[in-house]
Image (tube, coloured by chain):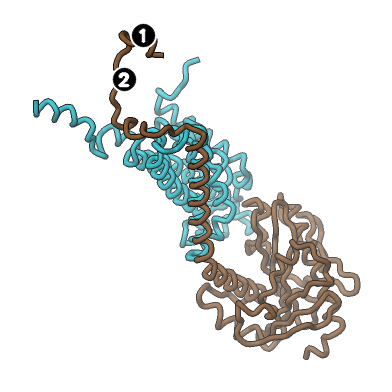
Chain colours: A cyan, B brown
Amino acid sequence: MSTETATAVAPKKESLFSKKNRRLLTDPLDDSNPITVQVLGICSALAITVQVQQAVIMSLAVLFVMIGGNVIISLMRNIIPDRIRIIVQLVVIASLVIIVDEVLKAYSPDISEKLSVFVGLIITNCIIMGRLEAFALGNKPGPAMLDAVGNAMGYAWILLAVALVREVFGSGAISFPGMGQVKFLPESWFMANGGFYENNNLMILPPMALITVGIIIWIQRSRNQGLIEEN
Amino acid sequence: MCAAVKSGCPPPLPDPETEKTMAFNKNSNGYTFLFAISMVVLVGSILAYMSLSLKPLQKANEAEKKMMNILGAIGVPSERGAVKPEFAKYVTERVSIDSEGRRVNSMSGDVNPLDKSDPFNIDVQKDFRSKAPASELNFPLFVCEKDGQDLYVVPVVGKGLWGPIWGFVALESDMETIYGAVFDHKTETPGLGAEIKDIPFQEKFNREDDVKKIKGVTPHFAVVKSGLPTDEYSVDGITGGTITSKGVGEMVDRTMGIYLKYFQSAPKAQK
């Protein structure tokens, strides 16, 4: 009898880093990537991938809001009335974003200036709302946190990859928060100084972000054939 | 529905997760209202508390940023945290004038962020938004001294493509030649209009690179479409950021129109 209850209870006390939970972290990096597979959060991927440093700051901000939102909604999941759940999620996200914004303005004004418009963009980032609705509302806080970290990372690496391509080819430079922008090409290479090289201005414009994301999707699908839909 | 076929109905699955919450009906109208109201009150008070308690720090940061911008316009680099002594060193006088170019107030020494009569604390952006007639407003002017030369820094405010743009323009002691300028914006497009706050654009206003002037009696200064020829009263705009560029020209032109009255009537009294 005692052994029987023990085995019956065991699967309930699943470790936070069980195989199933680890998939919550790794899946969004590839198989269910929020940008390349679910095609969510495209708007911010276009807007803030001109420089790597903006992408890094945006990724960190999304990570914070995502973890906060997922955990709070998961804790509240049993008391939220179904009919107003979307607006409750929105209020939680918006409050977190405003708190981030206010704290940055007070303690880290330089970063706050860099973020400027993007803080508002976090509220409209559909990945966050999507995860709250699809995962946090039906799961415990632990897995919800892992899901948030996984999806934020899945979002972040695409953002960084696109930003890296755009900044290197568009500005001939790489930037990182706290380091500023480092131009690594010698000035004499540029046509203005009699050289042969010119930065590709098209890279800086939004359409190239979409094309870069497209190329990433292409590479991803050729490596991971399971993602290709059957016609 | 199970009540009709009581005998054939399987017992409901015991789910410990939902069992706890079945004590109340979370989808009743009353509960929904109660939930919504208490959440709004809770969130509202948290945000209000945060906003009030962080306000002094934010104000101090804004004032520092303003000082950095004023110093930036006269070409003095400065850093957050170390800007106040630099500001006191270079900015000798803070003047406010009215729309007719008459001197209203003048101050020097340390800036007191609470003193409303200090020209430093005039919020030109708020005045610009308020749409109050110019005759009711006061305009700040910062008199600076650098390398033995008097410089006049004028704050400018205007409209970009998506939102407000602003900046500080420094004039030489002839009150006509632009010595330098800094610009900033709230929501202009990154990579296009947002470049007004970058060095390549602001360098075009730099005295050492190009002589640019504001015009005398009928002021007419412009930032023209990128690529068009420019003279000493116009500056080359940003490719793809035409509306923002035009906004910069418009705000410099309009604001200088007000200050010119002061410059023409009182330059001698100034010295």
Quadrant in which residue B208 is drawn: bottom right
Q: Which mark is residue B12?
A: 2
Residue B252 is situated, as x and y percent measured from the top left of the image, at 78, 67
Q: On the picture, is A16 further left or further right than B52?
A: left
Report which residue position mark 1 lands on: B5
- Is residue B30 or residue B163 the one in the foreground? B30
Going 48% across and 53% down the picture, which residue do you hit?
A57
Q: Amino acid at mark 2?
A: Pro
Quadrant in which residue B253 is drawn: bottom right
- Is residue B125 or residue B44 the one in the foreground? B44
Residue B79 is situated, as x and y percent measured from the top left of the image, at 53, 73
Check the image and report above or below for A60 versus A6.
Answer: below
- Is residue A226 or residue A182 the one in the foreground? A226
Residue B222 is situated, as x and y percent measured from the top left of the image, at 81, 62
Q: Earlier in the sequence, mark 1 or mark 2?
A: 1
Closest to the camera, between mark 1 and mark 2, is 1
Q: Is residue B96 visible?
A: yes
Q: CA distance from mark 1 to mark 2?
A: 14 Å
Check the image and report above or below for B169 versus A143.
Answer: below
Indicate the quadrant containing the N terminus of chain A: top left, top right, bottom left or bottom right.
top left
